[in-house]
Image (cartoon, rainbow, N blue to C red):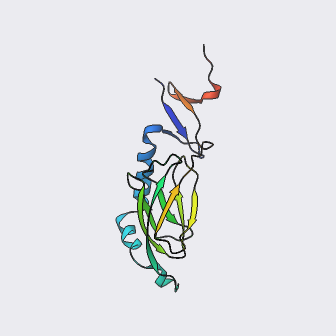
């Protein structure tokens, strides 16, 4: 039986069907309920920043315009802020108005967009085909597709 697997940069193999579930479980573990409560607070007040938090909404799609669920949306260089896109690719996050949002998902190129006090940001992520490799499972081991020989 052959299965299509993806290999990340660390060399770990993931089944194609389980990629989204794995990503969502990792992000959910990072953004626990305690973390979510922290996100609704105003951490910029403790940093003596003059920027206020604003609510940013938007959508994340692929290059063909299909909404991407499970995309991680975070603030560059700041902890305590984070969101995940819903099944339609929509998101909502409270961030400082001077923040830069980082959009990332396995299999897509990471994108950084400055907020600049905007309340709606639509993003199109491009696929990162260099990150994904074709791997065929053979028995109990794995081999790259290019090293297989037909007999």
* Total marks placed: 0
Q: Residue furthest top?
A: 151
Residue at 58% of width from left, 52% of height from top?
109
Measured as percent of width and height from the top left, residue 125 is found at 54, 52
Residue at 48% of width from left, 61% of height from top?
73
Q: Give the quadrant of the C terminus.
A: top right
Judge by depth and name the residue closer to the eye, 22 or 129.
129
Residue at 54% of width from left, 72% of height from top?
99
Measured as percent of width and height from the top left, residue 74 is found at 50, 64
Q: Is residue 21 above or below residue 102?
A: above
Measured as percent of width and height from the top left, residue 92 is found at 41, 65
Using residue 94 as the reference point, say whether residue 6 is left or right of it. right
Residue at 55% of width from left, 76% of height from top?
98
Measured as percent of width and height from the top left, residue 47 is found at 52, 83
Q: Is residue 145 above or below residue 12?
A: above
Q: Is residue 119 above or below residue 139?
A: below
Using residue 135 as the reference point, say whether residue 72 is left or right of it. left
């Amino acid at each position: 039986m052959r299965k299509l697997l993806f290999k990340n940069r660390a060399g770990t193999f993931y089944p194609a069907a389980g990629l989204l579930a794995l990503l969502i479980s990792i992000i959910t573990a990072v953004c626990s309920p305690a973390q979510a409560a922290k996100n609704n607070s105003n951490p910029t007040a403790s940093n003596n920043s003059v920027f206020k938090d604003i609510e940013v909404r938007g959508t994340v799609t692929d290059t063909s315009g299909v909404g991407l669920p499970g995309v991680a949306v975070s603030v560059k260089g700041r902890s305590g802020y984070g969101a995940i896109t819903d099944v339609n690719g929509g998101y909502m996050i409270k961030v400082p108005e001077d923040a830069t949002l980082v959009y990332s998902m396995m299999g897509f190129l990471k994108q950084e967009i400055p907020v600049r006090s905007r309340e709606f940001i639509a993003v199109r992520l491009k696929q990162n085909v260099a990150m994904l490799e074709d791997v065929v499972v053979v028995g109990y081991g794995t081999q790259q597709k290019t090293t297989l020989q037909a007999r």
